[in-house]
Image (spheres, rainbow, N blue to C red):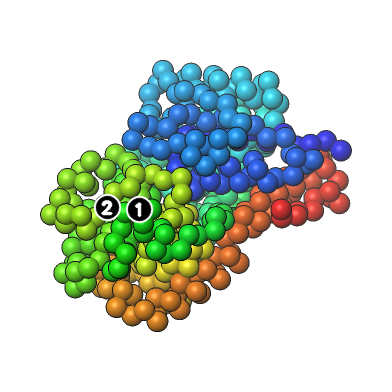
Amino acid sequence: MRRLRILRVLTRMNVGGPSMQVTTLHRHLDPDRYEQRLCTGHVGEDEADYQALFAPELPVHRIPTLGRRIGPGGDAYAFAKLFAHMREFRPHIVHTHTAKAGVLGRLAAVAAGVPVRVHTFHGHLLHGYFSARATRVMTAVESALARRTQRLVSVGAQVRDDLLAAGVGVTRQYRVIAPGTVLPTLPDRAAARRELGLPDDGPVVAYVGRVTGIKRPDRFLAAARIVRAAVPETTFVVCGAGDRLAETRAAATDLGDAVRFTGWRADVHTVYAAADVVLLTSDNEGTPVSLIEAALAGRPAVATRVGSVDEVVCDNRTGLLTPPDAEPLAAATIRLLRDGSLRERLGRQAAEHAANAFGPGRLVSGIDRLYSELAVERGWWPEHRAVSAAP
């Protein structure tokens, strides 16, 4: 029985959900059923490399101009290299992740005659990223590409619904497959705080993620000021980097050492272990892995009700959701910091929910079922072989 050849294309391996997902799939999809190849670009100077930090053993085919920067010459080169990989590897399925890889990878797959194209939307660019005109162009491009794509994967139901409402694909093309991950064993709270140089006493509020416009670091700082006024002993930890890091550091000078910037850390679980609450202030999200990780660590989140966040954080059961404004975010954070029993209950329920809904087996078995379904449709596998088994 033939193995399916899967060529996966990702714009870059920066720290975040897409890199985590492709790594999990390469590690855990059954090698007796699948032969996999990953093509990706280089991370930006203001980004951390997920492969270097978390998956140094992962085999990667680097295409320098496949990174986030857009330019006709570099994009044409990336297209040509992807086309060459496809002609040499002869994949049954090209599976693309993130916007630029989705465009170039699917166009190259059509040109190379790859029979099946799959694209994962880890979020979308319909809100908060571009001007109205640029968003219309992006939507038109995605709609056209969807007509040449056999399956569209979304990381959450709301992400799918937003894309359908914008005219990207049709319902029968979509499969909702949530991210899946695990955390290493957490250090105890005191050891974690020592490692991070944080005060032994007093509450800690953490932010984990890219420091970039759509994540609204300005809103994070505005909420931090309100929280500090009500709970003066609170310390805030920002674990991440991005194009707004220097600007955010400068804007936080009035808060002094109440805000600590750690950069990206390979031991991100240490940040969760040190924290009492995890805060997310974004204007737009898919299904944020940082909130899944926080939940697995037993830490309740306060987050904006955007994208598929409410599929990770169940309001008043595993955390608190608010409109995207500093005042309600701060009020919810203050409520959790002042009410230890509520914080403990939500954290415990968050851990239970995340373990059931977002374990790596759910991601791997979901993608395995999807590929098996396509293999049976194409006649590559008999139906009895299309049995998914989580690792």
- Residue 196's tag is 1
Residue 228 in the image: x percent, y percent? Answer: 19, 67
In the displayed structure, 41 sits above or below 386; it is above
Say the numbered circle drawn on residue 107.
none
Query: Which one is nearer the viewer's eye here, 165 or 216?
Result: 216
Q: Is residue 314 above or below residue 112?
A: below
Asked which secondary structure carries label 1, the reply is helix
Residue underneath mark 2: 260
For residue 128, say whether it is visible.
Answer: no
Residue lying at 16% horizontally and 54% vertically, measured from the top left: 256
**Is there a contact, CB below 8 Å, between mark 1 and mark 2?**
yes
**Residue 139 position (above or below residue 290):** above
Q: CA distance from mark 1 to mark 2?
A: 9 Å
The residue at 39%/76% (across/down) is 343
Residue type, label 1: Leu
Tell me the crowding category of disc 2: few under 14, some 14 to 19, or many 20 or more residues within 10 angstroms, Cα based. Answer: some
Residue lying at the far left of the rendered structure: 254
**Residue 378 percent coordinates (x, y):** 77, 40
**Residue 126 position in % (x across, y down):** 38, 49
Residue 184, above or below 76: below
- Picture mark count: 2
Q: Nearer the viewer, mark 1 or mark 2?
A: 1
Q: Residue at x 55, y 39 (%)?
A: 55
Q: Please tell me in which quadrant of the rendered image residue 37 appears.
A: top right
